[in-house]
Image (cartoon, rainbow, N blue to C red):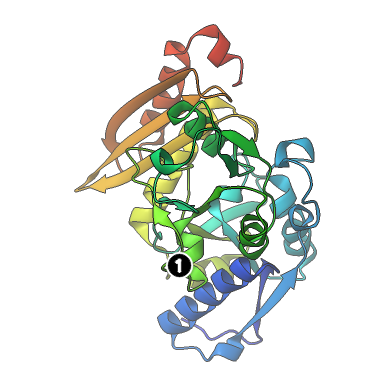
Amino acid sequence: MAYPDKPLRLGTRASPLAMAQAHKVRDALCAAHGWSHDTIEIKPVIASGDKILDRALAEVGGKALWTKELDVSLLSGEIDFAVHSMKDVETVRPAAFMIAAMLERGDVRDRLIGVESPDALPFGARVGTSAPRRTAQLLRLRPDLKITLFRGNVATRLAKLNAGEADATLLAAAGLDRLGMFDTGTAVPVDVMLPAPSQGAIGIETLANNVSVNAWISEVDHAATYHCVSAERAVLAALSGDCRSPIAALAIIDGASINLRAEILSPDGRLHVTGEAHCAAGDLDAAYALGKALLDRAPPALRAHFG
């Protein structure tokens, strides 16, 4: 395959975790094609979601706050492709863009920091998080807990915890690992807290009509990750949830098929519906049907939190 005639420009958020993920993408592409590192120029931008830290995401624009600056850079030709945490990418994206590849997924679990397990939290303990899914799951397990808003990058949240603003917090294991923080916190089993859809996955987005760039990037795609994350995103699409809607989903490759589990909850965790499906890899209709089945079985008070 042809060598780029000029450096390819990779757009990323400027946070330490996003930069670490951009370097993983650069390294994967250089290894796949035998390129030197200067073939790819990393161009960081400050995303709106990194600027607004005192309010929940749903109050200030939702997941688009993580992608809109990079979208503008792609459309204007300032960058050739962008790296995203797939958990932060809107379910419905403009037709001009495509997820050309996903790297092999990291650890999908959450890590609890401050105590060894949810059961170890004192009665009425404060847990810092801004995620509706984590909030609902914690309150389902422990209705006595108090949830306090934690926004910001990993270092900011850990600083809040160390300053005593909460007794514990939850962070994605994959993000901690990518920052070299392998021993931080205790992983929560997925049977206790099913993760967010797409958690632990890194996606590479391009302009859909950029044939040469798409061809280069496709070489680093991890097919199992792509199929699993696509199935989880199909569940999201069926639910028409927003950033206030507590949704969990996890797809795992099982031979030639996928085992897909999903859960919807009320914000206070009192109501919840779970479901499971086995489908062929790439059968997004079956994944979508699981999301619809969850809604069909949900009581009206739970369904009201979804589209």
**x then y, percent, for residue 252:** 30, 46
- Give residue 97's position: percent from left, percent from top: 64, 53
Q: Is residue 186 left or right of residue 304?
A: left
> Which residue: 46% across, 64% down?
184
In the image shown, does 1 or 15 lie closer to the viewer?
15
Q: Residue at x 41, y 80 (%)?
A: 32
Q: How many marks?
A: 1
Q: Residue furthest left?
A: 255
Q: Is residue 91 left or right of residue 178?
A: right
In the picture, residue 145 is in which quadrant? top right
Local secondary structure at mark 1: helix
**For this view, does 66 lie left or right of residue 213?**
right
Residue 257 coordinates in the image, percent (x, y): 24, 42
- Residue 228 is situated, as x and y percent measured from the top left of the image, at 38, 47
Q: Which residue is mark 1?
A: 177
Which quadrant: the C terminus?
A: top right
Of residue 220 and residue 164, the one placed in the foreground of this image is: 164
Depicted 203 relative to depicted 151: above or below: below
Number of residues whose C-alpha sits closer than 10 Å to that of mark 1, classed few (under 14), some (14–19) or many (20 or more):
some
Indicate the amino acid at tag 1: Asp
- Compared with 237, 37 (above or below) is below
Residue at 42 percent of width and 37 percent of height = 249
Q: Residue furthest front?
A: 122
| Residue pictured at 51% horizontal, 25% vertical | 143
